[in-house]
Image (spheres, rainbow, N blue to C red):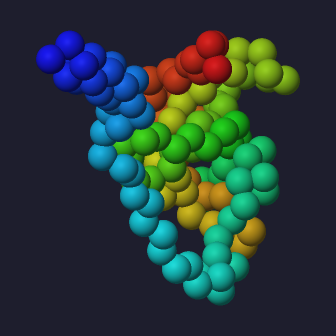
């Protein structure tokens, strides 16, 4: 009887050591999709977009793209625009959806934008812990 108890005790002990390895939850799966490289050729590299001057339909400069942000919950990227200021002093950052920008004649155009309308948007502040 003592041997049976010892054997059961060892089985329980060994099982308790192996449980954490199996307690990680359901395995995750990754869904890959096939991308046609020719569709990417019509896109814009972020390295070329960031720093671009933004103009309106009248070809007036209204801002500059400071950054692009992708969030985990949204399906569209956002463009952080720097507006106002002079030589970086007094610059305000605002955010628009990247899809609101248009590329015309190799220029980034934000239809309907003026310096005043962009300055009236809520200010975006970068998270300083990044």
Looking at this view, name the residue that lies furthest to the left.
1
Viewer-proximal residue, 67 or 26?
Answer: 26
Residue 110 position (above or below residue 71): below
Judge whether residue 96 can be spotted in this image.
no
- Point 72% across, 72% down: residue: 105
Residue 84, percent across and down? 67, 26
Residue 102 position (above or below residue 53): below
Judge whether residue 29 can be spotted in this image.
yes
Q: In this view, does 17 lie to the left or right of 99?
A: left
Residue 85 image-quadrant placement = top right
Which quarter of the rendering shows the N terminus? Answer: top left
Q: In this view, does 105 lie to the left or right of 12?
A: right
Residue 5, percent across and down? 20, 17
Looking at this view, name the residue that lies furthest to the right.
87
Which quarter of the rendering shows the C terminus? Answer: top right
Q: Is residue 27 left or right of residue 124?
A: left
- Point 42% across, 66% down: residue: 31
Residue 38, percent across and down? 65, 86
- Point 44% across, 60% down: residue: 30
Residue 104, percent across and down? 65, 70
Q: Is residue 69 left or right of residue 4?
A: right
């Amino acid at each position: 009887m003592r041997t049976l108890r010892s054997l059961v005790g060892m089985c329980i002990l060994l099982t308790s050591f192996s449980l954490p390895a199996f307690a990680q939850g359901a395995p995750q799966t990754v869904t890959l999709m096939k991308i046609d490289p020719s569709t990417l050729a019509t896109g814009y590299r972020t390295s070329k977009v960031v720093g671009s001057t933004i103009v309106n339909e009248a070809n007036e400069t209204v801002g500059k793209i400071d950054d692009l942000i992708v969030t985990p919950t949204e399906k569209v990227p956002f463009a952080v625009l720097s507006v106002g200021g002079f030589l970086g002093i007094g610059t305000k950052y605002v955010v628009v959806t990247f899809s609101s920008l248009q590329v015309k004649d190799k220029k980034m155009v934000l239809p309907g934008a003026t310096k005043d309308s962009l300055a009236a948007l809520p200010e975006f502040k970068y998270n300083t812990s990044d």
